[in-house]
Image: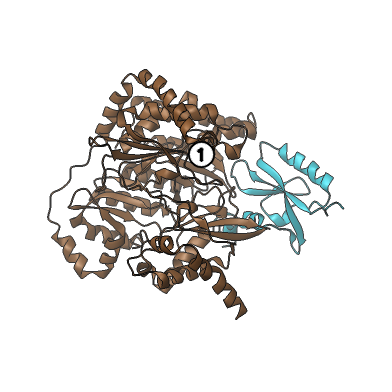
Amino acid sequence: MTPRFCPMVVTANDLRLGDVVYLTADDHWTRHHHQAELIEDEAHAQMRLLHAIAQKSVIVGAYLADARQGPRGPESVHFREAFRTRGPSNYAHGKQADHV
Amino acid sequence: MYSYSDFDEAFVRARVAQFLQQVARRLDGSLTEDEFRPLRLMNGLYLQLHAYMLRVAIPYGTVSPRQMRQLAMIADTYDKGYGHFTTRQNIQFNWPKLPDVPAILQALADVEMHAIQTSGNCVRNVTADHFAGAAADEIEDPRAYAELLRQWSTDHPEFQFLPRKFKIAISGAPNDRAVTRAHDIGLRMVRNAAGAPGFEVLVGGGLGRTPMIGQVVRTFLPVADLLPYVEAVLSVYNSFGRRDNKYKARIKITLHETGKEELSRLIEERFTELRPLFGGHDQRLLADIRAAFAPPAFRSAPTDSFDAIYSADPVFRAWADTNLAPHRHPDYAIVTISLKAHGQTPGDATSDQMRLIADLAERHGHSDLRISHEQNIILPHVHKSDLSALHAALMQAGLATANVGLISDIIACPGMDYCALATARSIPIATQIAQRFKALDIEHDIGPLKLKISGCINACGHHHVGHIGILGLDRAGVENYQITLGGDGTQTAVIGEKTGPGFAYSEIVPAIERLILAYLNLRLSPEETFLTTFRRLGMLPFKDALYIEKDAHHAA
């Protein structure tokens, strides 16, 4: 039995700022996880990753991260990815600064 | 302190100019990330979880007030108004933007600083005893040797592509405050039977996934033989180090697989070849460098004002008892400024704090500052009559925390709050432990205790050599914290033992509390430290406190 495919998003860091970004369904990079394209098919995931990696002047370090559908859009599954959506826990820096 | 020669200046400036062009080529798409990564790493620029991170070397932990002010300027102009001092005597800026990094390197070069060899498989920033040149127990200031090693290793053509990174630590005193036994090469100054100074040379120490204490390959190396001998060690390692497996590539594995006898033989053989080639140039250079580390002109003044305030003011007394260390000059003290205020991130200093500390160093400390591997800042030379004014100024800036060497003086790596390699967070564990023991108000009663936290097995937080070590791991997608006990980072170095299963994020602070309360019950007297008690009793009573009491609590 093959393991069930876990939905994913394509994520990377912005080349200039280093900020965490996600690939949207309409080929933009967003700073917000819930705006990412939730990919539910493995072959499509690989295609989207290749598409991301090719954008070498915009982003760096693209990879696929597990995700799931939430009320506002895709949500992170692993705690590392959850931290990436916010910023560090010791200061209100990074993305969470927008909400302070 | 050492000032750059024309050669140093030209070298660092040339590097900045090169990196400016490399960044431009990366931004215009001429360089791919695969091509650019080794170039940025050579200049200390990492890509972390949320942003880039620039790691700047503070060679042998010595920094001048002028340099400290420039670090504050960089923090304000290009970062978020603070810097993080690390266990490798570096400062890290957590939020630089790639297009700004060449300007930051330029600003560093303006004050004789750089980020060269703070990453990559080369000889990294040479670290030293943070009390160098001041400690009462010191044989000789180790920084002249550290500077010699820095000059020799910088851009050394033979050693830019070693099997893996290579860390050298040096101590000028028999009491090891530089964790020399956990470095690829550890150099600890000793005297021979004739009274001449030399080095005990240890090879193959290191923490990380395979923690090992270094082994002595030379009990006494005359100081004049330092460079050819270190070069011989590197040369042997460069030839025999395992390039096939990243996890077996450090010299500790080479030592383990080759055996100490054979490795020592190879080193001595190479040393015999290399020694005549140095021809005395290194010794002439060393003589010049030594002059740069001449002690300051110590002041002669009465110290009775110190004695008076020490007996009259309990707040000052508490601070003096923990944060002062004996100076070689009887009228002076070594001051450790704690960057571990309860609840604050260990090792972080704001730009305002950096500027204040620079001012205080000029006013009271012969313009000398050090960064310790324990992530604190040292004023190595303060006349005792100045301590009262210094303490008052530190209090106003929130920098007078009286906790050096106590349970809240925690080493913590950046962990998963910043680091791309981390498997769990370190900082919030450190801040919660510090706050908990402040609330219990027992840390002075507990006494000397080294608690060290790493957020992954790479062990930047030195957890293996903490009396209590905490290692953060990812266990099935959840943060989990493993405890080790009995570690020691001094001249009697030991790797701590694992207690057993790890604890969840919400369980780790109560677990440490149970451990400490058990110690307070078990110790023979308040003078028996945690480490001594552990050595006397072994693991069992502490395991009981950690696991049986936990189960009892759950069953209740």
As rendered, which of B160 and B16 lies closer to the eye?
A: B160
Q: Which quarter of the figure has residue B439?
A: bottom left
Q: Which chain shows up in cyan?
A: A
B163 lies left or right of B61: right
Classify B17 as above or below B107: above
Q: What residue is rendered at 46% in x and 33% in y?
A: B261
Q: What residue is rendered at 45% in x and 44% in y?
A: B182
* Farthest-out residue, front: B261
Q: What residue is rendered at 71% in x and 38% in y?
A: A55
State which quarter of the image contains the C terminus of chain A: bottom right
Classify B302 as above or below B235: below
Give the mark count: 1
- Is disc 1 placed on a helix, strand or loop? helix
- The amino acid at mark 1 is Lys
The local crowd at label 1, few if under 14, some if 14 to 19, many if 20 or more residues have their Cα within 10 Å, is many
Classify B151 as above or below B92: above
- Judging from the image, mark 1 belongs to the subunit labelled B
Coloring scheme of the render? Answer: by chain
B115 lies left or right of A50: left
As rendered, which of B386 and B517 lies closer to the eye?
A: B517
Observer able to see residue A53: yes
Q: Which chain shows up in brown?
A: B
As rendered, which of B206 and B257 lies closer to the eye?
A: B257
**Image spot of residue B92 (x, y percent):** 47, 46
Observer able to see residue B9: no
**Image spot of residue B67 (x, y percent):** 35, 42
Q: Which quarter of the figure has residue B307?
A: bottom left
Would you name the residue on which mark 1 appears? B252
